[in-house]
Image (tube, grey):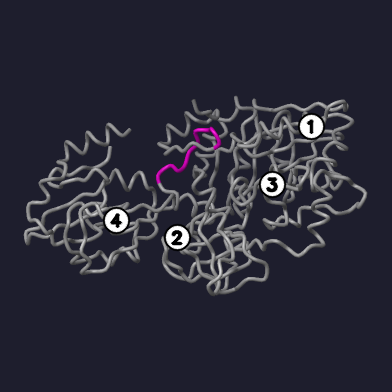
Amino acid sequence: MALRTPLYPEHHRLNARFVTFAGWEMPLHYGSQLDEHQAVRRNAGMFDVSHMGQIDVDGPDAKPLLRRLLANDVAKLKTVGKALYTCLLNESGGILDDLIVYLRGPGSYRLVVNAATTAKDFAWLREHAQGGDVEIRHRDELAMIAVQGPQARALALGCLPPEIASFAAELEPFSATQCGSWLVGRTGYTGEDGLEIILPATDATELWRSLHAAGIQPCGLGARDTLRLEAGLNLYGQDMDETTTPFDCGLEWTIAWEPAERAFIGRPTLEAQRIAPRRWAFVGLVLLVDGVMRAGQRVWAEDQAIGIITSGGFAPTLNRSIALARVAPSSGPDCAVEIRGKRLPAQIVKPPLVRHGRILLEL
Amino acid sequence: MNELPTDLRYSKTHEWARLEDDGTITVGITDHAQDALGDIVFVELPECGRKLAADEPCAVIESVKAASDLYAPVAGEVIAVNAALRDTPEAINNSPYDEGWILRLQPDDPHALDSLLESTAYAQLIADES
């Protein structure tokens, strides 16, 4: 039996086409994935992301624990509400998950993790917290709605409780405000401005309906995937997993090397990789002819196989196919992608390809 | 409910086939099939003149979700393809039985269509699959 979010009845009412994702029955689209994608790039769309895991880490030992477990450093979070994107690594530097951590108060953190990895992360955190003065709670009574697009904040603010709306209006990028069990952050996964609203599951339906009435387009996981692909954002389980380190998937920038004495899990492997020749370059690809690149397809240069596509698809904003790929270092820019036995010309480019509605690509 | 014209014949792999007045057969995918695929973004069409066996994969339909093969519902030669799909692949979503046609065959056997499903049998097949 698939898991369902508190908003499942709303999706059903809106005639969603469903897909099973990480054990959850989630909306894939509500009619047209392309229309939903364009709504986010041009106006505003909303996503039910209540399947994602919310884990609270609280107590005097919360900060030292997270400084040991996360490759980015929560000591950078100086003011309440600030957020940080980071990898959670295993001993060999492999990525257990990527997540956003919010500082909720002194010694109080909220981790927003991937749906498929929530149970694994929770167990990992608990295991490493043993003996410490820290409480780790899976907040599965919470829901989460992401509102994204150039008009997203303006439209969504009027739907928020007044006591939180005034603070939400003033949020800097990558920071959040809280009120009771609500947490509203200026974050997202689409390359557009917007808010991610964490709230009690019992309040989710009312907010969803209010956002919809304000003119925000419901969007499914299909559009979420093409939006993040254009924005050059990695998807856990596809562009990275426990066999890849942050160096292999373009996430080197998320590693906090300073202070040098911070001994986080995976650090020795990363230090060794840092001075060794790179195994891979993580790049964007643009297909120069008609066709659609997909994950798992091989990338060629001359007559050498140089790598593999980790995510691919049709990019509605660019009206052509794009991909993320792991290729041999210093490849390109000319290459070919093998699609159904044929090698089609493609070009290696630097992600992101779309940000804030603008195409960043020049061919 | 998906549209299902009664004057067409259907394959188990969700193609429709229409016998034209000149004895040729027009082929596309059903409303049910386009709905399941989602937004179609690219169609790889066969060359005109290509000879096809029945059930042979002869075109690829790429949607936002995945790539799917189109199978020849009957044996024959490709005599025309819908070149307009190169610019407007979404015609398959918007008009699967009309503007979204994919290719036209000269069948080897003029009675080949009789082996395909009638609309009632195809409706049953969809119901059984879901």
**Which kind of residue does numbered mark 3 sit on?**
Arg
Q: N-terminal of the two: label 3 or label 2?
A: 3
- Residue A71: assigned label: none
Instruction: From the image, tell me which residue sits under label 3.
Output: A186
Give neighbour class at mark 2: few <14, some 14-19, many 20+ (Cα, 10 Å). Answer: many
What percent of the width, then of the height, locates residue B15? Answer: 24, 49
Q: Do the dots labelled 1 and 3 sit on one chain?
A: yes
- Label 1 Cα crowd, 10 Å radius (few <14 / some 14-19 / many 20+): many
Quadrant of the rendered image containing residue A155: top right
Residue position marked by numbered label 2 in the rendering: A292
The chain letter under disc 1 is: A
Query: What residue range appears in magenta?
Result: A22-31
Camera-near label (1 vs 3) is 1
Same chain under badges 4 and 1? The reply is no
- Same subunit: marks 3 and 4: no
Q: In screen coordinates, is B33 left or right of A22?
A: left
Magenta stretch secondary structure, dominant: strand
Q: Which mark is residue B57?
A: 4
Give the Cα separation between the discs numbered 4 and 2.
18 Å
Q: Secondary structure at mark 3?
A: loop
Image quadrant for the C terminus of chain B?
A: top left
Examine the rendered structure and indicate whether residue A295 appears above or below residue A116: below
Element class at badge 1 = strand
